[in-house]
Amino acid sequence: MKSLQAQHHVLADPRHQLEVLDELTSGHIPSFHDKLKQTGQWPLLADRVEILQINVGKMCNQTCKHCHVDAGPDRREIMSLETMQSCVDVVKKFRIPTVDITGGAPEMNPHFRWLVETLSPMGVHLMVRCNLTIILANKKYHDLPEFYRKHRMEVIASLPFYTSDRTDRQRGTGIFAQSIEALKMLNEVGYGHPDTGLQLHLVYNPAGAFLPPPQEQLRQEYQQVLWEQYGIRFNQLYVITNMPISRYLDYLLQTGNFERYMEQLVQAFNPLAVKGLMCRNTISVDWQGYLYDCDFNQMLGIPVIPEASRHISRFDIQTLEHRQIAVRPHCYGCTAGAGSSCGGQIV
């Protein structure tokens, strides 16, 4: 593969990221399209829309090294109330059963609570991607555990590892201690306990240029350490492979690991993971209301293929339910080993 080691800046422009990925991989690894053809799984088609994943903005109280959203305190992209209303209208009209709210730190959007309070009476299953430290960031967020509990939200919380050194190295000094405190607050209102139905899941991302270990093995380690040392309970651990985009792509280029990492992903391609890819039952909405096959395509600016339904205001479920998925080299990240999705391993 060609080397672009001189590019040591964060690849914030989606078009530039895509150009870099194409230049580095073209002619050096099989295209994902060709790999699917080889395994008799092309075209890759969606078969339903069960989840509307809404990215309500890129503002975040943290600046994590692996963040594929390139989120941080300086980001000002925030979903408007008007766009949120369009999302609500789509969920209601087409009876989409699950809404997955993400960011940035989604709670920093000033309309976050309105969105939850509007969707909750509809009987929608609500998920929130929480970085944990937002709960302690400001007094106005201290009641978030109770707010989540009131609306029976499923909380998916990022905790890179069960030790402070590895977590703080990836997310910033003191983040682990704050995360532990936030997890205790969630436990106090019933999250993570087997008899409450309040689901608390943790998310692990590798800290370097390697694939994650088996999910079940790591879950047992997390549960043992977090319970024995901190008295913390949680339900499931989601192991997610890092995608070669945004800050993680920048990291791979700076450290000279891009070629090796992409070769790992290609060599670990698992055709059994294709059937369970999240793009097959999910539509991702960006802060402006544009539609994508997944959160990763969103960050690379690759919209859904049906041009007539590329915005939440023009949502056409018949077209979207059987659309062809747009694929690029980063898709190998979702099909490596046991597969990877927003819900952890696939197989």
Image: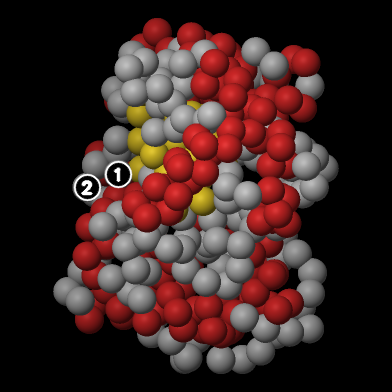
In the visual, does 183 lie left or right of 63? left
Residue 71 horizontal/vertical position (percent): 70, 46
* Viewport quadrant of the N terminus: bottom right
Give above or below for 114 relative to 79: above
Q: Residue at x 68, y 62 (%)?
A: 247
In the visual, does 249 lie left or right of 260? right
Q: Residue at x 65, y 13 (%)?
A: 143
Give above or below for 206 relative to 156: below
In the visual, does 250 lie left or right of 116? right
Mark nearer the N terminus (1 vs 2): 2
Proximity of marks 1 and 2: CB atoms separated by less than 8 Å: yes
Q: Which residue is identified by label 1?
A: 281
Check the image and tell me how it is coloured. Answer: secondary structure
In the drawing, what numbered circle is on residue 47? 2
Give above or below for 44 relative to 180: below
Residue 174 in view in this figure: yes
Q: Residue at x 30, y 44 (%)?
A: 281
Residue 144 horizontal/vertical position (percent): 61, 17
Give above or below for 156 relative to 243: above
Residue 14 in view in this figure: no
Q: Residue at x 37, y 55 (%)?
A: 217
Outermost residue toward the front in this view: 228
Q: Callout 2, which amino acid?
A: Asp
Residue 118 horizontal/vertical position (percent): 48, 12
